[in-house]
Image (cartoon, grey):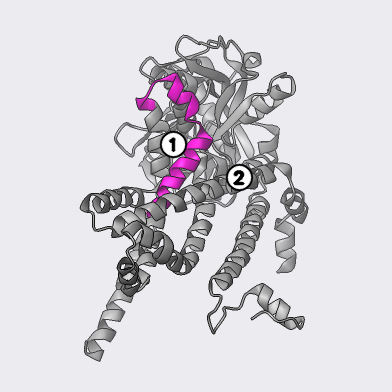
């Protein structure tokens, strides 16, 4: 069985491309776009979440409409609509020259992500017991002050796991950017495979790099969760905390 | 909910899911039946044709070679018609399987279909993996915005420009080779299929689109006056019907059928129907 695998899977090709500059270029594109879009999405998402829970009907419905549209259409359709479609409608050089592939990718993915982050933010805010808001109000804080100083800091702890999920999902969804001509990790592998017909080897290279990034990110997320749990009786165990315990140190 | 009812509901759900999954397992075929009992070619020794059907893999998004008739799921095009004529000559019917171009050779290898016929140029790299029966000779064309603002006349003028192409095509290789002799690199933008590449040109994301000449011509025609094709066909090369290396008998009968339809004038008449007599095999 191993012989069968070895005959049809060329390990030389796999190792060659694992550290190939073209693959790294694709990986870098993926990371750049994912990080920028995620930052944009989180910031906008939190604002939308506050609007959604607000008693102001205008704010609440505007945010609701936003979430409805950006969650309700596939991101690849959004890319085609707002990259190609907008440029078709607006035949001005000043727009077309500045609405580049890369900028459109970051902004459209960011707008899409904000819709999901809005719901995560809303869940986080709702998870903070209503007594906190009452107490804040009784101290004379406005809604926004209470949000910023009391509610959101507590909501963040609940928001971390689903936000981590969103980052990982976004990282992988960027592969659809090929439709607007951006070659990220998956399609860098695809391009190379189309030349040497070694599909299995190259797709495996891409898979390895996605897993590497997700692994590093998961470790970082676990550490963040542990930090946010400071002061709790049962501290969540992370890879580092277990390693340190084994080496005889004390960490909670 | 009473226990028996719950169990029944669960079983019903499982049965429904199973039914849906199995009904979805079917072939995605487009039928283009030829008349049975064609010519005098003996196909008894050809295992692929035992079922009386020649299955053809093609990326049906490349007018005028293969495309879907507007608003339908019926394939049409030069490759479609030639495949139909060859199948008729062999006394079998023909079915098309729409397959993405960049995986089509792998799909042929995996026996998803008997042959591939997808406006594919015969190259040394491709010939290492599969065999070809040449059937027409086609060059590459450059599509630019109407009025040719960058004054592009040939491959050399693409240096320093942004050119949109489809993945896995010879055009990608041609541009990379051209880059070696360019002072300013060509910004090669790759897309999953050619229509998206043309869209990028139309919306100003690229300066030119590089594709097979007849395709470039048709894209310019269909662009409502926004695009035009540069009037030189670059490096005409033969296109081939792709056959697995192991399918030697199939290769022989396909070549024989092609010879037959060239000899009796069917080939010439199909080409002239599509205004593509200029790309006949010579």
Chain bearing tag 2 is A
Neighbor class of circle 1 (other Cα within 10 Å; few <14, some 14-19, many 20+) is many
Image-based side of A60 in relation to A158, left or right: left
Q: Quadrant of residue A3?
A: bottom right
Helix, strand or loop under label 1: loop
Question: Which residue matches tag 1?
Answer: B60
Q: A169 and B23: which one is in front?
A: A169
Q: Quadrant of the C terminus of chain A?
A: bottom right
Q: Position of residue A38 (x, y in %)?
A: 50, 51
Q: Residue at x 49, y 24 (%)?
A: A97
- Say whether residue B202 is visible: no
Q: Give me the C-alpha separation between circle 2 and circle 1.
A: 20 Å
Q: Quadrant of the N terminus of chain A?
A: bottom right
Please state which of the two labelled residues, at mark 2 or mark 1, is closer to the viewer.
2
Q: Are marks 2 and 1 in contact (CB under 8 Å)?
A: no
Residues rendered magenta in the picture: A88-115
Q: Main secondary structure of the magenta part?
A: helix
Chain bearing tag 1 is B
Q: Position of residue B213 (x, y in %)?
A: 52, 20
- Say whether residue A131 is visible: yes
Image-based side of B178 in relation to B110, left or right: right
Q: Is residue B226 above or below residue A174?
A: above
Q: A148 and A243: which one is in front?
A: A148
Q: Position of residue B11 (x, y in %)?
A: 30, 80
Asked if residue A113 is among those painted magenta in the image, a careful observer would answer yes
Q: Quadrant of residue B16?
A: bottom left
Q: Position of residue B268 (x, y in %)?
A: 47, 19
Question: Which residue matches tag 2?
Answer: A190
């Amino acid at each position: 069985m191993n012989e069968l695998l070895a005959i049809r899977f060329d390990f030389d090709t796999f190792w060659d491309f694992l550290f190939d500059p073209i693959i790294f270029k694709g990986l870098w594109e993926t990371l750049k776009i994912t990080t920028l879009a995620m930052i944009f999405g989180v910031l906008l998402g939190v604002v939308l979440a506050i609007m959604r829970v607000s008693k102001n009907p205008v704010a609440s419905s505007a945010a609701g409409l936003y979430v409805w549209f950006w969650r309700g259409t596939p991101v690849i359709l959004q890319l085609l609509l707002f990259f190609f479609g907008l440029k078709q409608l607006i035949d001005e050089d000043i727009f077309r020259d500045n609405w580049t592939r890369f900028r459109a990718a970051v902004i459209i993915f960011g707008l899409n992500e904000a819709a999901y982050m809005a719901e995560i933010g809303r869940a986080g805010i709702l998870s903070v017991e209503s007594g906190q808001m009452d107490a804040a109000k009784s101290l004379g804080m406005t809604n926004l002050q209470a949000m910023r100083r009391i509610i959101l800091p507590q909501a963040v702890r609940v928001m971390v796991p689903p936000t981590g999920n969103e980052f990982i999902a976004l990282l992988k969804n960027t592969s659809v950017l090929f439709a607007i001509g951006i070659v990220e990790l998956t399609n860098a592998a695809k391009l190379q495979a189309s030349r040497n017909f070694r599909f299995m080897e190259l797709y495996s290279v891409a898979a390895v790099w996605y897993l590497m990034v997700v692994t590093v990110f998961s470790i970082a997320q676990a550490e963040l969760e542990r930090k946010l749990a400071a002061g709790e009786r049962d501290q969540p165990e992370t890879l580092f905390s277990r390693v340190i315990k084994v080496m005889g140190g004390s960490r909670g | 909910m009473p226990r028996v009812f719950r169990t029944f509901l669960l079983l019903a759900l499982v049965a429904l899911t199973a039914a849906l999954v199995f009904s979805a397992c079917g072939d995605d075929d487009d039928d283009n039946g030829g008349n049975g009992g064609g010519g005098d070619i003996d196909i008894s020794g050809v295992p692929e044709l035992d079922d009386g059907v020649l299955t053809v893999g093609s990326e049906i998004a490349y007018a005028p070679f293969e495309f879907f008739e507007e608003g339908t799921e019926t394939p049409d095009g030069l490759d479609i018609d030639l495949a139909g004529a060859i199948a008729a000559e062999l006394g079998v019917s023909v079915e098309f399987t729409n397959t993405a171009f960049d995986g089509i050779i792998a799909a042929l290898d995996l026996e998803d279909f008997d042959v591939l016929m997808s406006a594919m140029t015969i190259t040394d790299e491709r010939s290492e993996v599969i065999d070809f029966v040449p059937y027409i000779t086609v060059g590459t064309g450059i599509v630019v915005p109407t009025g040719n603002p960058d004054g592009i006349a040939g491959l050399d003028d693409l240096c320093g420009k942004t050119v949109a192409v489809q993945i896995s095509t010879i055009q990608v290789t041609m541009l990379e080779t051209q880059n070696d002799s360019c002072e300013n690199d060509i910004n090669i933008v790759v897309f999953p299929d050619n229509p998206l590449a043309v869209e990028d040109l139309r919306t100003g994301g690229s300066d030119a689109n590089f594709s097979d000449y007849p395709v470039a011509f048709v894209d310019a025609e269909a662009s409502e006056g926004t695009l035009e094709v540069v009037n030189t066909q670059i490096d005409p090369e033969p296109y081939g019907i792709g056959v697995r290396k192991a399918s030697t008998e199939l290769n022989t009968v396909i070549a024989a059928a092609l010879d037959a339809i060239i000899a009796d004038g069917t080939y010439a008449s199909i080409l002239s129907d599509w205004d593509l007599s200029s790309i006949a095999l010579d």
